[in-house]
Amino acid sequence: MDAAVPGAHLSEVYPIVPFEPVRGEGVWLEDAAGRRVLDLYAGHAVAALGYAHPRLVEAVASQARELFFQSNAAALRVRDEAAQMLADFAPAPLERVFFVNSGAEATENALRIALRLTGRSTVVAVEHAFHGRTAAAGAVTWPPRKSWYGFPRTPMDVTFVARNDIDALRAAIDDRTAAVILEPVQGLAGAWPLSAEFCRAAREACDATDALLILDEVQTGIGRLGAPFGADLLGVGPDLLTVAKGLAGGLPAGAVLMRRDIASELGPGALGTTFGGGPVTSAAITAVIDTIRRDGLLERVRAVAAQIHASCRVGPVRSVHGAGFLLGLVTGPRAAAVRDALLERNILTGTSTDPHVLRLLPPLILDDEHAARLAAALGDLDHATF
Ligand SMILES: Cc1ncc(COP(=O)(O)O)c(C=O)c1O
């Protein structure tokens, strides 16, 4: 057995970028040979505060010294603080929090709540959506047949409507609909925003039929769009909201936020998890939200995103779309080729399911100098590169 061969004992399910980071600081990753790479991808939008952020590191280390773990069977002040912090950061009616460990688990539980409380069996989702890889989350992920990840049947009926097609949306929602699930900006699909009109129409149709509106903010939440949540930008209040990824800055964490009356209807034993809301993760959640607030990161995201919009339509990039730090750069050549060329120039970016959209999901601490580096590197990529 040769433990030194990279990946020799891992399941071979991931395409791997040709760069192996061993440490990180701020928005920079470094490999064992000292090569430094500007990270505009943040590990699929997780490293919200970048790397080695002193407040986050200290919060995790000191909580680990005090009490490393206890489950939800024990009351924990540090968990209460995280829930309070998150509920205060979220849109007003969402004042109760159920902590989980990942985005898929948050989706799964939000759908479970909607199906259970309405007693209905159909969910309306949007074409090109991504909500996770577990059974219920996979069922509302596009494309329907491929996205069930090997399960023989879905746990509920799902109707997909085209992105931003308000008439199709209205026609799909009726008194069999338990929930409508939307990503404010479709992340994996290539950072394509849903229109505010479409999301408002979903809210109205849910109100008219007593269906629940779920916003999946796993990728868009916790400041990534330059607002606490996408719901704030849309002006649409969901009944349930899911969050994960950047929530604890790198520890596995997710949450379902809900109105108080929904939480009261659930009752003891309705939901459960072993790890969700553990003390170290809770301390990290509090540190992440506190830092976003104290360091003015929402304002920074808005300003630097505007700079990227204004300066990055150069070289292979035809247009820039998205919101805040969930940006899609439409490329003439294949996005994967542009990503590879940028990585050769020490800038890490990501792709999407749209072969011509390069995705940027940088840490929220990115500044104007880093954005200028990206624009310069893109400008240097001429046609001969591809
Ligand atoms: C919008 C959205 N929902 C759900 C998920 C699933 O999250 P996880 O990979 O943590 O299960 C993702 C992951 O990319 C996502 O982008």
Image (tube, rainbow, N blue to C red):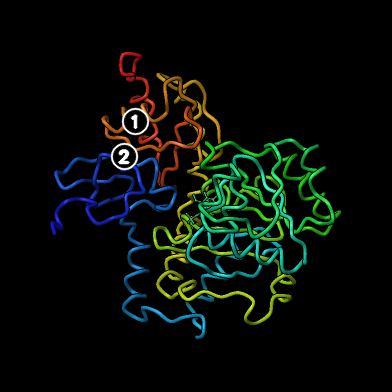
Horizontal side of 110 relative to 365 (left or right) equals right
Q: Are marks 2 and 1 in contact (CB under 8 Å)?
A: yes
Horizontal side of 30 relative to 378 (left or right) equals left
Disc 2/disc 1 C-alpha distance (Å): 9 Å
- Secondary structure state at the residue bearing disc 2: strand
Mark 1 surroundings: few (<14), some (14-19) or many (≥20) residues within 10 A: few
Residue located 67% across and 37% down the image: 163
Q: Label 2 is placed on what type of residue?
A: Leu
Q: Specify the quadrant of the image occupied by residue 10.
A: bottom left
Mark 2 surroundings: few (<14), some (14-19) or many (≥20) residues within 10 A: many
Q: Which residue is mark 2?
A: 38
- Secondary structure state at the residue bearing disc 1: helix
Q: Which residue is mark 1?
A: 373
Say whether mark 2 is within 8 Å of ligand 1: no
Vertical placement of residue 189 versus 123, above or below:
above
Q: Residue 98, position in %: x, y?
A: 58, 70
Q: Residue 55, position in %: x, y?
A: 37, 62
Check the picture and name the quadrant holding the C terminus: top left
Vertical placement of residue 138 versus 115, above or below:
above
In this view, the residue in front, 39 or 116, is 116
Q: Residue 321, position in %: x, y?
A: 55, 31
Residue located 59% across and 45% down the image: 145
Eye-nearest disc, 2 or 1? 2
Check the picture and name the quadrant holding the N terminus: bottom left
Residue located 33% across and 26% down the image: 377
Of callouts 2 and 1, the N-terminal one: 2
Vertical placement of residue 372 versus 218, above or below:
above
Most extreme residue toward the top, as rendered? 384
Q: Label 1 is placed on what type of residue?
A: Arg
Q: Residue 336, position in %: x, y?
A: 38, 30
Residue located 83% across and 55% down the image: 207
